Amino acid sequence: MDGENFFLNTVEGKIYAIYYSPTGNKKPNANVIIVSPFAEELNKSRKAISEFSRACAEINIGVLVIDLLGTGESEGDFRDAHWGKWKANIFSAYQWLRQRDAGSISCVGIRTGAILLLDAINSNDYELSKIIFWQPVVSGGVFLKQFLRLNLAADMMGAGLGKVTIQSLRDILASGKNVEVAGYELSSKLFHELDSLSLNNLVPPSRTQVRWFEIVSEKFQDVSPKKQQLVNRWRKENKIDAEIITVRDEPFWATQEIVVPRNLIEITKSFFVNDNQL
Amino acid sequence: MESTLDTTKSILISTLQLTCEAKSLTLDTKLLGNIPELDSMAVVSLITAFEDHFDFIVDDDEISADTFETLGALIDFVEEKNK
């Protein structure tokens, strides 16, 4: 049994969704909403998302995957996408599951999806059981700098004529114009919204378990001190049951070839299985 | 503490998913134009991987095609950033 796909009607437009029902179409014990990463990272993550969804179906967990407006099969162009619409998309997905009497709802935020998820939760009325992060992006600004760098690299390799700099791209965006990066037309609005956001300024809701899965390689197994400090702060100051868990796996969102992070999927799945509160 | 050479090599191999052995890479190994996996997307992934691993931030005026010409040039760059 594979996912059932449909369009979810929202105020902002039609968004493409896939719902993976538990195997045998049983009533799910719990449900998960996937909050996608940004631009090309989403394409690299699709296989990981579908494999994770199938793994969840086997343990009686339903998974709802949505394409945010302006991405994938959903309505709209990437240049029209902005943060507010995306937050509304996530809330629409949440309401869709709530209307199905779906039991507890959890979310998995992948890369910038982690920032989007926390920002969305803080802007609306959610009741979530668990929040899971897969290699979350901490700073939207640093992430965008890395994203804009794609144009620099293209220029460096001879595709461009003039000397492109991050600052020259930022100047264009600051003037309200869009910039095309690796085939994605990044709007000034979306850029500035994400640029100002960081997990450092967001706090997960209380009474929600937060598990931050950080991919490590065989050689490097340390979590950066800054990330550890952030989670420690959530625990101490905000009294949140939050934890960073390292997983030895491939950086699936960035690899040249598509890879499926089997260990990450298994460990995330066991986090659901080992929980009797579902 | 392993050397910058070893670390740079292993980041290069894991980021580009190269199948070659670390010992086959020397300071003179040509990177740009020689390793087909090293396209613009990969250059960005590499810089990001260095930033994540070494916890430094690379400014755009610090990098050019020269930085990625050979493994030796790349290591010089990483060592300079780590000072």
Image (tube, rainbow, N blue to C red):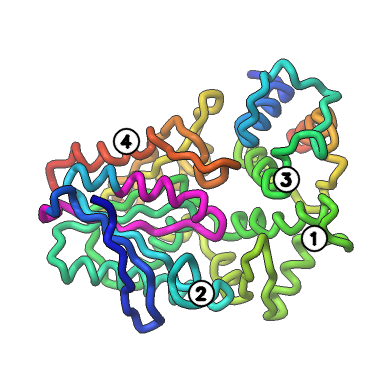
SS at mark 2?
loop
The Cα–Cα distance between marks 4 and 2, rounded to whole angstroms, is: 33 Å
Foreground residue, A209 or A249?
Answer: A249
* Residue drawn 80% across the image and 29% down it: B71
User: Which of labels 4 and 2 is toward the front?
Assistant: 4
Horizontal arrangement in the rendering, residue B11 relative to residue A11 (left or right): right
Mark 3, residue position:
B39
Instruction: Find the magenta span and give its range.
Output: A26-53
Q: Is residue A41 left or right of residue A124?
A: right
Chain letter of mark 3 equals B
Q: Secondary structure at mark 3?
A: loop
Q: Chain of mark 4?
A: A
Question: Badge 3, how many Cα within 10 Å: few under 14, some, many 20+?
Answer: some
Residue A82, labelled with which disc? 2
Q: Do pointers 2 and 1 mark residues of a single chain?
A: yes
Q: Chain of mark 1?
A: A
Mark 1 lies on a secondary structure that is loop
> What amino acid type should be assigned to the residue bearing mark 1?
Thr
On the image, numbered disc 4 is attached to which residue?
Answer: A266
Q: Residue B67 in magenta?
A: no
The tag earlier along the polypeptide, 4 or 2, is 2
Q: Total number of numbered labels?
A: 4
Q: Residue at x 21, y 55 (%)?
A: A21
Q: CA distance from mark 2 to mark 1?
A: 24 Å
Nearer to us of marks 4 and 3 is: 3
Amino acid type of the residue that numbered disc 4 sits on in the rendered structure: Glu
Label 2 or label 3, whichever lies nearer to me, is: 3
Is residue B83 visible to the viewer in this orientation of the structure? no
**Residue identified by numbered label 1:** A165
Instruction: State the residue lying farthest toward the front.
Output: A1
